[in-house]
């Protein structure tokens, strides 16, 4: 059925609002469907061993190794801020060693994964969208097809796989840096000894927390390259289009990371 | 041969509305038309880089759009010269041209033979292989990129070549070299060439038949002589304008 909604008889504000909402959700489903298809295509190329090793290793380097300095800084700041904030709020009857638990849990469950993901959205996601968008508008993607080469296997898959592998490593790194920085900050600010810090951390520690942190890392590590590749492949309209699509992609990825993050507690912390 | 049947394609506005065209085996065929009439779109529908909304393309009698296998076979038979060269940014010239050789051949052919084929393809487009092979596309001029793009399209020894403005942006010496190459491929190897070009005179001199795309349909299709003598006012206006532009170009370069 093909109804032209613009010819509708009741253009009331409410009606118009619904129409816009309808179009918006159509867009969301459209993107979600395309990203799902992209994910399956990447999976297929991977199990068929069509992904070039060299490109994969290069992406691991670009996403993982080159991100270490910035992830170090954000991880350390996350630990320090949590420690200062916690120290400020914990007055009176609460034993000081609880600060150890607070820092470790906040960093591992929340700050480590989310901040690393946000950093990667800017550092890696934007770069992938701009790179692939440029390839799209300069007909390079067409060229792959015309030469019977599969851009999914050659371009998309190395980036997605590298994301899934590099992200947990980076989150683990951010967790460790954050905890150490938080510990040092607690020592300086509140005079909490390292052993009390660890005592507190161990007291409330579940090994499940580590799994939770890495589960987030894997999900974000999958979402960021999938969205950025998807947006890159959809780019049109020359250099201006590349700029526009990159901005959209950054918005899209940031929102997705925050929404996915909000879905974790109800799904995995019960 | 290539057969286009009732090709329709709209983006936000109709671009192609019912194009029928046959390009014969071994023929050199030029396609003219004002900018933005859909010449590139029509070329892209040949190997499904753009899917038509309606219509079919057959290559050597086999529909490109029947299924994945026929599309794959079609793409293997066709070499495509992109309007903007479309070289892979991250690969050097050697790797770019190497991509023009099908994967199975790369696996089964000795590396020395591959290297020789790439070398020869670059020589055919008047490039000095020793100089350009290690360069990446951003280190080349526009005209050099274009010729690397041609080398990549011919190195796989296709039976059909689709040329999207192969001589635009080339100096007269290299324009002549590319035109000679198209003629040689057609005469010696029976390669079918469909050439989109703004160089009306060049196209008329070189090609067996020409067509003009205008308003989403073929306005004209016939031999170069018929084109020159056409009494269709649209064709005449187009030829006159092209001649005027050419004269202007000449005046500017002198
Ligand atoms: N992928 C696309 N998405 C949307 N519109 C497109 C796309 N490709 C082409 N068009 C539109 O189709 C029309 C024809 O474009 P095309 O590139 O085929 O023109 P052309 O005849 O090759 O022009 P030129 O001689 O300048 O290369 C243009 O209006 C263009 O905006
Ligand atoms: Mg064009």
Image (cartoon, helix red, strand yellow):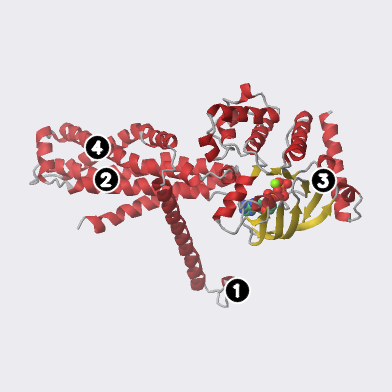
Q: Could you tell me how far apart the alpha carbons at marks 2 and 1 are, in whole angstroms? A: 51 Å
Residue holding disc 3:
B208
Residue holding disc 4:
A178
Residue holding disc 2:
A214
- Between A11 and B26, the residue placed more toward the observer is B26
Whether B141 is drawn above or below B182: the answer is above
- Between B43 and A261, the residue placed more toward the observer is B43
What secondary structure is marked by label 3?
loop
Whether labels 3 and 4 share one chain? no
Q: Quadrant of residue A25?
A: bottom left
Name the residue rendered at 71%, 60% in the picture. B5
Which numbered disc, 4 or 2, marks the residue closer to the eye? 2
Q: Say which chain tag 2 marks.
A: A
Does the residue at mark 4 contact the one at mark 1 (Cβ under 8 Å)? no
Q: Where does the image place residue A251, in percent across and percent down from the top left?
A: 44, 50
What secondary structure is marked by label 2?
helix
Q: Could you tell me how far apart the alpha carbons at marks 3 and 1 are, in whole angstroms? A: 51 Å
**Within 10 Å of the Cα at label 3, are there few (<14), some (14-19), or many (20+) other Cα atoms?**
some
Disc ID at residue B234 = none
On the rendered image, what quadrant is the C terminus of chain B found in? top right
Q: Could you tell me how far apart the alpha carbons at marks 4 and 2 are, in whole angstroms? A: 15 Å
């Amino acid at each position: 059925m093909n109804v032209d909604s613009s010819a509708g008889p009741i253009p009331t504000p409410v009606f118009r609002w619904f129409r816009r909402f309808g179009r918006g959700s159509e867009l969301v489903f459209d993107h979600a469907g395309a990203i799902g298809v992209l994910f399956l295509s990447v999976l297929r190329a991977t199990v068929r061993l069509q992904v070039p090793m060299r490109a994969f290793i290069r992406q691991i380097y670009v996403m993982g190794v080159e991100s270490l300095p910035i992830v170090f800084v954000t991880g350390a700041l996350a630990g320090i801020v949590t420690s200062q904030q916690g120290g400020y709020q914990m007055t009176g009857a609460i034993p000081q060693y609880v600060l150890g638990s607070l820092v470790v849990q906040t960093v591992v469950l929340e700050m480590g994964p989310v901040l690393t993901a946000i950093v990667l959205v800017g550092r890696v996601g934007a770069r992938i969208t701009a790179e692939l968008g440029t390839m799209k508008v300069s007909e390079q993607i067409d060229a792959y097809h015309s030469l019977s080469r599969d851009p999914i296997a050659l371009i998309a898959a190395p980036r997605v796989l590298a994301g899934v592998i590099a992200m947990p490593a980076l989150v683990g790194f951010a967790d460790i840096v954050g905890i150490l920085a938080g510990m040092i900050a607690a020592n300086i600010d509140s005079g909490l000894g390292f052993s009390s810090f660890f005592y507190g951390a161990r007291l409330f520690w579940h090994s499940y927390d580590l799994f939770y942190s890495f589960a987030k890392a894997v999900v974000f590590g999958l979402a960021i390259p999938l969205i950025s590749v998807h947006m890159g492949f959809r780019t049109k309209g020359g250099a201006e289009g590349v700029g526009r699509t990159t901005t959209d992609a950054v918005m899209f990825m940031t929102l997705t990371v925050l929404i996915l993050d909000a879905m974790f507690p109800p799904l995995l912390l019960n | 041969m290539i057969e286009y049947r009732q090709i329709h394609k709209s983006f936000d506005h109709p671009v192609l509305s019912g194009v029928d065209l046959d390009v014969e085996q071994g023929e050199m065929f030029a396609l003219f038309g004002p900018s933005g009439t859909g010449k590139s779109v029509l070329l892209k529908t040949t190997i499904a880089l753009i899917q038509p909304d309606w219509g079919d393309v057959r290559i050597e009698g086999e529909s490109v759009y029947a299924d994945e296998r026929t599309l794959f076979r079609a793409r293997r038979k066709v070499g495509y010269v992109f309007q903007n060269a479309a070289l892979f940014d991250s690969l050097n010239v050697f790797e770019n041209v190497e991509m023009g050789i099908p994967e199975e051949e790369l696996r089964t052919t000795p590396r020395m033979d591959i290297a020789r084929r790439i070398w020869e393809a670059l020589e055919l487009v008047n490039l000095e292989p020793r100089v350009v092979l290690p360069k990446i596309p951003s280190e080349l001029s526009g005209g050099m990129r274009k010729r690397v793009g041609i080398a990549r399209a011919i190195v796989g020894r296709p039976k059909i070549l689709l040329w999207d403005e192969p001589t635009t942006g080339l100096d007269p010496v290299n324009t002549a070299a590319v035109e000679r190459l198209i003629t040689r491929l057609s005469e010696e190897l029976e390669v079918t060439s469909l050439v989109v070009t703004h160089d009306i005179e060049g196209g008329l001199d070189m090609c067996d038949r020409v067509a003009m795309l205008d308003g989403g349909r073929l306005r004209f299709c016939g031999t170069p002589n018929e084109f020159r003598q056409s009494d269709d006012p649209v064709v005449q206006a187009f030829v006159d304008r092209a001649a005027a532009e050419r004269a202007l170009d000449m005046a500017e370069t002198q």
